[in-house]
Image (cartoon, rainbow, N blue to C red):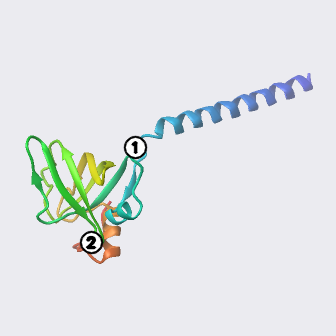
Amino acid sequence: MKGLKKKRRIQVILLAFVALALSTGLIGYAMRDGINFFRAPAQVMADPPGANETFRLGGLVAEGSIVRGQGETITFEVTDGAATVPVAFTGILPDLFAENQGMIGTGKLVDGVFVASEILAKHDESYMPKEVADALKEQGLYKGADAEPNG
């Protein structure tokens, strides 16, 4: 009787381990396209990502770079002070999107142009995403009201 209980306990433990490993693998597989890495313009220019890699680009919208084309396509440049990346976006920009303001875009690099599928702009006077603020601090360009990023 004792041998049967021990054998059953080992089987349950092994089954639980297999179920845990399988569920971890399925979760990782499902999330592989949902993970977007943040990059500053200098990082994108120094080490361009692969053609099919979706990532987040953040920085300041360069002054005088916004060009509204035919239809809904808008082009502009994003800078971190060290490098500038041209951006193309088709859609409606956030209301607070403007030159010399912080932004983060999600998309892919196609022939040297960041083709954004989503653009996020700062939401109030003092907000800037932490990653963008850190990149700008490295370049000496961060001009926060309290010198600390929110978020």
Which residue is under mark 1?
Answer: 52
Which image quarter: residue 3? top right
Name the quarter where the C terminus is drawn: bottom left
Left/right placement of residue 49 relative to residue 29 reads left
> Residue 5: which numbered mark, if any?
none
- Give me the residue at 30% from left, 60% from top: 129
Left/right placement of residue 17 relative to residue 133 reads right
Question: Where is residue 148 drawn, in percent x and y?
Answer: 31, 71
Q: Secondary structure at mark 2?
A: loop
Question: Where is residue 34 drawn, in percent x and y?
Answer: 41, 41
Q: Amino acid at mark 1?
A: Asn
Question: Where is residue 55 drawn, in percent x and y?
Answer: 37, 50
Which badge, 1 or 2, is on the more N-terminal residue? 1
| Residue nearest the viewer, comparing 90 with 4 | 90
- Give me the residue at 23% from left, 49% from top: 119
How far apart marks 1 and 2 lie (CA) works out to 26 Å
In this view, 59 is above or below 75: below
In this view, 116 is above or below 20: below
Which residue is under mark 2?
Answer: 81
Which image quarter: residue 122? bottom left
In this view, 32 is above or below 6: below
- Give me the residue at 14% from left, 61% from top: 65
Name the quarter where the N terminus is drawn: top right
Left/right placement of residue 144 relative to residue 38 reads left
Question: Where is residue 120 drawn, in percent x and y?
Answer: 24, 51
Q: Nearer the viewer, mark 1 or mark 2?
A: 1
| Crowdedness near tag 2: few (<14), some (14–19) or many (≥20) residues, C-alpha within 10 Å | many
Q: Amino acid at mark 2?
A: Gly
| Residue nearest the viewer, comparing 65 with 28 | 65
- Give me the residue at 16% from left, 66% from top: 100
